[in-house]
Amino acid sequence: MNSSVIVVGLYICTIFLISWYTKHRAAGKAENYILAGRQLTTPLIMVSIVGLAVGGASTIGVAEQAYKAGLSAGWYTTAWGIGAIVMGMTVAKKYRSLNITTIPEMLERYYDKKSMIIGIICQIIVQLVVMSMQYVAGGMILAALMPEIFTPTTGMLMSAVVFIGVTLIGGMWSASITNLMNVSLKYAGILMAVVLAVRMAGGMDQIQMNLPMPHGLDFIDGVGPMTIVTWIIVLITVNLSLQSIIQISLGAKDVHTARKGFIIGGLLMLPIGFVSALLGVIASELYPNISATAALPQVIMSLDPWLAGITLAALWAADVSCACNLLLSSATLYSHDIHKRFVDPNMSDSKYLNVTRISVFLLGLLTLSFALTISGIISTLMAGLSLMTAFSVIVLMTMYAPKYCSRAAAFYTILASVVVLVAWMFVPAVRVLPHVIYAEWIVCGVLFVGISAVTRSNAIHMEGVEPAAVQEGKTKAVPAQH
């Protein structure tokens, strides 16, 4: 039997066994399934954020970019690490102290219902785009591992079975505990692969001599300093406001655990992107005529069959760990902020749990359909993730300058972020800045501050908060917890 089949088979069996083992922890209250009962420890927070960040885009996507642009593509994953560190040092503690479940819940609590509704739509769309990247990467990995069994398309289908199955069984407990294995496996696998790949290519000096690009081993040239700065800004923005990231911090057992987990996880991410990038650079030398997306799987498959199987299983583990968090958080946005709020406000906790599980299944299938039409992993991600700018502006102002925030500002800021992204994509004349993220920050920042300045009489209140929706007579006040 093919060694890759054995390795991947063992891996799939192991993660499903772990998921079944954790199933009892996710039973009972919906909070146990969605937020691990708010009992995650520092190591589990750490591997959860690393597992979410170092997924298909940070491995397959980085190698794809490095195949064309060189080692500097590794800054993408480093930018993720910087974003996680900033999150840990700033708002992770504040998020946990608010005792919320979702970002839209915060929007309704401090702003209004229409802000919550547009927030739900944007958060779900962005997360489904990111999730679809994991299917693309997962399909490429399985097709490289077992070409006699999988094509990229059937590889996506198999990835969907695992992503959805693991999340359905144990929720956040399953995702976080399997990440203990996933993160260890992918770091060990990628590091072993790069050592052997460098040796196979004749050493670093030989790689430098034979590179098809002059800047192949330069840490800055290739993607260029502006792209690097853009990645850092985008991923700091994302870490401050994307639901799947916030949900990890909300699952921490206390505020200090959330903070430490994010900072340590961010530090672990800083170097790993350059390792994946180096494999992409080696692939550009050894296999100059292959698809860039296949760069990392191709060079790994050139190694010892057992090591290749283990390493690609590790990369698939990166996909699994990322996808499970994204799928769970998207389902939470639907069950908590749409179904519970508008469809069945009086549903029992057990029904809430069932609705969340059904949402995991249906959103997983919907995302698979997106994945079948997407190409260009990192470029697609950067455009979608820029939509998080409005949320970051709102979060930072709400937590650090609440007396300068107007309840009217949030909705129009999120709406403006959508308008900016759509205009950027379809009206080339507006592209006067290097990337849409800069336009997003300028427009969202100026609009939020401007509306708040004009409507100061409608300011929010963080202490003893009375949500805007209460004044509208539509929901019960929930005091902010500090």
Image (spheres, helix red, strand yellow):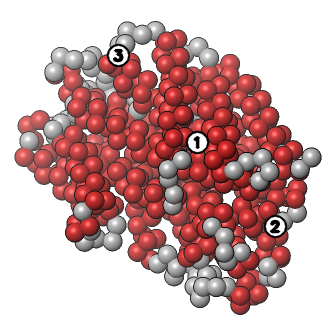
The x and y percentages for residue 201 are 79, 79
Q: Residue at x 12, y 47 (%)?
A: 451
Task: Give the crowd class for mark 3: few <14, some 14-19, many >=20 residues within 10 Å.
Answer: few
Mark carried by residue 323: 1
Which one is in front, 104 or 44?
Answer: 104
Residue type highlighted by circle 2: Ser
The type of residue carrying mark 3 is Val
Residue 110 sits in quarter: top left
Helix, strand or loop at mark 1: helix
Residue 38 against residue 86 in the figure, above or below? above
Horizontal and vertical percent for residue 348?
Answer: 46, 9
Which residue ends up furthest to the bottom in the rendered image?
209
Q: Is residue 161 left or right of residue 426?
A: right
Closest to the observer, 135 or 329: 135
Give the residue type that dot 1 points to: Ala
Q: Looking at the picture, how far across and down is residue 408, in whole percent?
A: 15, 38
Q: Quadrant of the C terminus?
A: top left
Q: Quadrant for residue 216, please give it.
A: bottom right
Residue topped by disc 3: 343
| Residue in the image at 62% along x and 38% along y | 160
Q: Residue at x 42, y 10 (%)?
A: 347
Residue 186 visible to an observer of this rendering? no
Rendered position, 144 above or below 217: above
Spatial separation of the CA atoms under disc 3 and disc 1: 27 Å
